[in-house]
Amino acid sequence: MSFRLMASLAAVVFTAASGLASAQSFDSCLAGIRAEAAKKGVSGATFDRVMAGVTPDAKVIESLQFQPEFRTPIWDYLATLVDEQKVAEGRAMMSKHAQALASAEQRYGVDRHTIAAVWGVESDFGNVTGRWGLPQALSTLACTAPRRRDYFRGELLATLQIVQRGDLPPEKLRGSWAGAFGQTQFMPSTYLRLAVDGDGDGRRNLVDSVPDALHSTANFLAKAGWRTGETWGYEVRVPSGYSGPSGRRDKQPVSSWGSRGVRAFDGGALTGSGSAGLLLPAGANGPAFLVFRNYDAAFSYNGADSYALAISLLSDRLRGRPGVRGAWPTDDRGLSRAERKELQQQLLRRGYQIGEADGAIGTATRKAIAEYQTRLGLTQDGRAGGRVLDALRAGR
């Protein structure tokens, strides 16, 4: 037997052994979770029903490594989440569910536009709630993730408790790779703490009941410190070459920002009471925002400034206010969902195999864009931006 063949066989044996060890480790992890769940009142029958056939999913770990709120340029992120289509859909859904929004607003003191904005950003008003089975996604993270295993273990235990309490059956447990699910994407532990019955049927169902989801979102924001009748913030201008303090945490009296030369976007004096932070999401050369306590409440929903800004700006657009007026520091603009779909249609016409033109930029679309960028002599980053779309439109 040749050395190369022996090495190949050894590699096969090692891989098989590693796979077996990994499977045994996963099973051992689940056994530990089963015992912990029992201490929290989850019966063995419930555990077995929820976890039947669950195996680790490598794609969940891939998703953990790429989170758009922290990697996507802010102008791309907002261009997709706060576009004309989203605003039109939001206004239509606010009209359709006016009673549920009004009752949630009255019950919790959070304005209906902000509640609707969370709904729109989180699930496109219930149209995109996630494809991952929570038991599989959360057990993968709890048992194999490179970080935060204890956190995801707690979320899996909360998922089991939701089923045990009778709120939802296992087949309804579908959401994001990280475990957020329902119309407004609650994590399971948040569901246990803050989900409420908004339609009066005695159950908390954030998957199928719009009133439950909207009331629960309002409850979340109220518990996070939302102040009734106050603004989240507004767009401002900073002096040229500004290098002073910034960030939502560095809150100072509004007058203090005025003394540093910060002005309302129209050039007038700053308004608002209390303390505010100066948000510079793209640096001092991009749009600037003065943000108050209600912005922090929105931030707590996801823990990213891009997300909180999307919620805040969409709520303004739903009120009829303008969007961002300052210019982003880029010559390659972000694309709306309609433009992303057009870009994909253009790629399909050129023979790129990217699947359906749905406006969602996945791996296949990014790869096709990178190939097209190479042809044009552009930076090969796979980004769906205005420069690529304009080139496609021009037939280049």
Image (cartoon, rainbow, N blue to C red):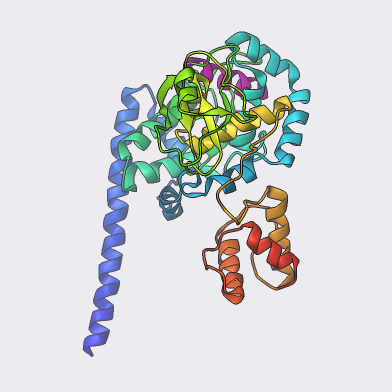
Q: x, y (%) of residue 133? A: 51, 42
In this view, the residue in front, 18 or 260, is: 260
In this view, the residue in front, 112 or 241, is: 241
In this view, the residue in front, 52 or 310, is: 310
Side of 258 relative to 119 (left or right): left
Q: x, y (%) of residue 125? A: 67, 33
Q: Which residues are magenta?
A: 210-224
Residue 65 appears in the picture as rendered:
yes
| Numbered-mark total | 0
Quadrant (top left, top right, bottom left, bottom right) of the N terminus? bottom left
Residue that appears at 74% across and 27% down: 320
Side of 203 relative to 7 (left or right): right
Residue that appears at 75% across and 68% down: 394
- Main SS class of the magenta portion in the image: helix
Residue 224 appears in the picture as rendered:
no
Q: x, y (%) of residue 66? A: 45, 51
